[in-house]
Image: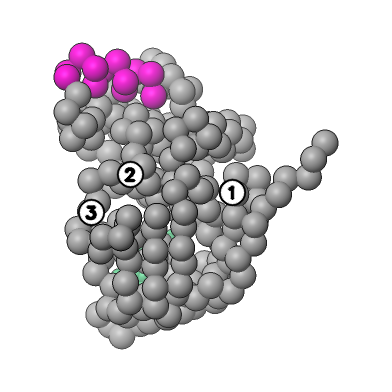
Amino acid sequence: MLQITGLTHSYADGHKAIDGLDLTVPDGQLLSIVGPSGCGKSTLLRAIAGLIRPTGGRITLDGKPINGVPDDLAVVFQDYSRSLFPWLTVRDNVALPLRRRGKSRAERRAAAQEALESVGLPDAGRKYPWQLSGGMQQRVSIARALAFRPSLMLMDEPFGSVDAQTREDLEDLVLQVHRTEKMTILLVTHDIDESVYVGDRVVVLNKSPARVHADLPVGLPSV
Ligand code: ADP
Ligand code: ADP
């Protein structure tokens, strides 16, 4: 369980991005987080990922305070251009985090290939990231996170740079992985339709600084 209490964050220039945010996310939930641009969504994810140290409040994962990047976490950022290592092939990029899982080289390669197939890039493994389009690079980032099979996955506008059809395919892929792997996923999006389609629950943040404005369970209409 992820538990956030009284989270506050002010950047070094004094800008307050988050102000007293409380949020509890049970294991296995797919939580969509929506809110206006600049309201502090990325800051929130960065704090959960241990990439910044918040100036106030408390974040615990299974009761333990976050201290550095948690072992069992994967993050997919909107900015794909900074997330892949340009000197590694696509397959090696996807396979790299699996070393932390103690997988053999052969297992890592097989898992990477499977993940690339699941995001619709079966033939991209031998290429380098810079030989792919932006949308394809973002799919590689998603493949890398999926192959790792983390217990917690943070996604910051992950589908912002892909075309509409790929976006739908990837939304369905994330839903499927969430269901089969029981992965806890926090998905930041500014697309209300996406938040409701993919999420079990939608949290709406206030305009800056971030606080929880509304917390809505999502029940899909039965057909
Ligand atoms: P987003 O797409 O999530 O809204 P932004 O465009 O706000 O992201 O920010 C992009 C990058 O610039 C982030 O790494 C963020 O930390 C940094 N950044 C944003 N605003 C500022 C600022 N006022 N001062 C310094 N860095 C900033
Ligand atoms: P969102 O992801 O909701 O667009 P962010 O978390 O990126 O919002 O940013 C929240 C606020 O904090 C914005 O006003 C942004 O300009 C500011 N900000 C982000 N990064 C920095 C930074 N490194 N230094 C100063 N201000 C920042």
Range covered by the magenta-colored residues: 104-115
Residue marked by disc 1: 199
Residue 66, picture quadrant: bottom left
Please tell me which residue is depicted at 46% across the width and 63% down the height of the picture. Answer: 24
Q: Relative to residue 67, is residue 184 depicted above or below?
A: above
Residue marked by disc 3: 69
Whole-Å distance between the Cαs marked 2 and 3? Answer: 9 Å
Coordinates of residue 198 in the picture (x, y in percent): 60, 44
Coordinates of residue 28 in the picture (x, y in percent): 47, 45
Mark 1 Cβ and ligand 2 under 8 Å apart: no
Residue marked by disc 2: 74
- Closer to the camera, 170 or 78? 170
Residue 11 appears left or right of 143: left
Name the amino acid, label 3.
Answer: Val
Mark 2, other Cα within 10 Å: few <14 / some 14–19 / many ≥20: many
Mark 3, other Cα within 10 Å: few <14 / some 14–19 / many ≥20: some
N-terminal of the pair, mark 2 or mark 3, is 3
Check the image and name the residue furthest to the bottom.
14
How was the colour assigned to the protein in this rendering? one colour
Quadrant for the N terminus, please. bottom left
CB atoms at circles 1 and 3 under 8 Å apart? Answer: no
Question: Is label 3 in a helix, a strand or a loop?
Answer: loop
Name the amino acid, label 2.
Answer: Ala
Residue 179 in sight in this render: yes
Please tell me which residue is depicted at 65% across the width and 45% down the height of the picture. Answer: 197
CB atoms at circles 2 and 3 under 8 Å apart? Answer: no
N-terminal of the pair, mark 1 or mark 2, is 2
Residue 158 in sight in this render: no
Residue 107 is one of the magenta-drawn residues? yes
Name the amino acid, label 1.
Answer: Gly
Coordinates of residue 85 in the picture (x, y in percent): 22, 37
Residue 79 appears left or right of 215: left
